[in-house]
Image (tube, rainbow, N blue to C red):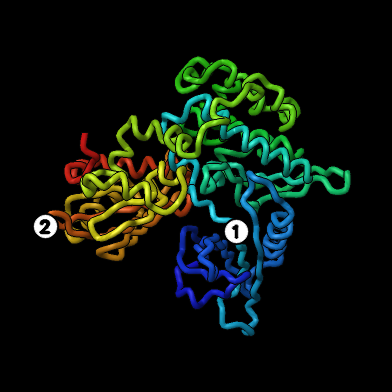
Amino acid sequence: MPDLDASSFPPISGFRLVEQLGGGGFASVYKAIDKGGVVAACKVIAMNKATPDKERKVIHKEIQVHSTLVHDNIIRLKDALILEDDGSSKYIPGAYLLLEMAHGGDLFDKIAPDVGVSDDLAHYYMSQLFAGLGYIHDKGVCHRDLKPENLLLSINGVLKLCDFGLCAVFMYKGSTRKLKDRCGSLPYIAPELAYEGSYDAPPVDVWGAGIIMFTLLVGSTPWDEASVSSPEFMGYVNKSIWSKYPWDKIGNTAKDLLCALMAPNPSDRPSIHQVKDHPWFARQSQFATHSAGDMGQHLTQALRDTGAMDIAQPDVFTDADGDQIMATAPGTAFTQSLQFFTQLPNGLRHSPHLTRFFVSLSAAQLFPILLQTLQAIGARTKEKPPTTIVCGGYDARKMRFKGRISIEEFTWRDRNCCFVEMAREEGNPISWRQLWKMVVQSPSIQVHVLRKRA
């Protein structure tokens, strides 16, 4: 869906859509604000007269199911509106899902590729994911699309599970049914979905939770797909890979739980509630009493260790009052610790994307260099000079990614410089961060990148 004028969209529960945040194809996500300044997100799913009944049923199911789910670790569906393409409205037809805004952004945007987070921090976030999954399973709902891009953070850093577009109801009024349809993304789906026949729903989410846990600990997904065509997966099945990188960096207790969650036979996997008895899970959280600001620091530790945060938030524009600017910036201790607010010479900018950088080039100088760099990497580009590049492609796991790169020029010490924000719209946040890393480390751009002073 294109990024159209805000007046093309209907108000929903007093909220007006004001800015596109991401998405593409048949669904996009917009920022929405009410008269009191409260911010929400609105998922807009394209619908018209040609939309098949099967797709309509899926949309209605998502709304109906998600509206019943109220839990601290699940994005709240505030309201929904469906506008049919019947010519009766001046607004764009479609399904409008008004959602709680995840001000903390993507969880995996803060995680260094191929590094991951500490065992204790993985335990902290997996405990929240298991809490959310335990709740929906008790309600008879299976998510079926667990992957990094569906894990967000609240303004205080609480994990939020989102996107129930592929969910299924497997239990109703005490009666349980098996599922038949196949869905999900290859690196994350359970191996039983490769075979014909029906399957039990809860083990599919248990498998997905295992993939998430591995990705948290390692900073990458374990394989392209859970099938005989993947050498990595077969090495996991026959245990030949367990003593090799990156499996060898995972502690034995965590590895034991991973092997249970990702048991090839679904009947061998524990239920979400049984997971709570495992030693890795049952231990006391090391972060239970930490402040939100501390959690932001812990979450981005690897990014600071690798120098990524020095690029995302250089201090060249701040002086003695720089700390005061951050302390008085909008938001919470968590979002401030993530440095979502950037002080430019011409004002404060809010940027929830840590995939950003600054260069000592004008927009006219940077644009062709950046375009050439992206194309050399293998990304497909659609340019709108001199401020925007839409790029996409496929990552190392053959999964599609897409995003928008925005360039804002400013003057600093009589020099033209640029603030570059790379906002992911589709795909794995870790893959998008890998693209960011390749861009800022490319020889033609690296020499111009501004960094935090030592």
| Above or below, comparing residue 239 to residue 75 in the picture | above
* Residue 131: image location, x then y, percent: 67, 37
Q: Using residue 233 as the reference point, say whether residue 110 is left or right of it.
A: left
Q: Which residue, given by chain and number where applicable, does mark 1 sit on?
A: 99
In the picture of the structure, the residue carrying the numbered disc 2 is: 414
Kind of residue at disc 1: Leu
Lower sequence index among marks 1 and 2 = 1
Residue 298 is situated, as x and y percent measured from the top left of the image, at 44, 32
Q: Is residue 108 visible?
A: yes
Which x, y percent locates residue 297? 42, 35
Residue 111 in sight? no
Badge nearest the viewer, 1 or 2: 2
Image side of residue 328 versus residue 86, left or right: left
Q: Is residue 148 above or below residue 266?
A: below
Tell me: 385 left or right of 292: left
Q: Give the secondary structure at mark 1.
A: strand
Q: Distance between the residues labelled 1 and 2?
A: 44 Å
Q: Nearer the viewer, residue 134 or 149?
A: 134
Query: Which residue lies at the image location 39% right of the left edge and 42% below the top edge?
Result: 433
Q: Is mark 2 on a helix, strand or loop?
A: loop
Q: x, y (%) of residue 445?
A: 21, 46
Image quadrant of residue 435? Answer: top left
Residue at left offset 62%, top offset 39%:
189
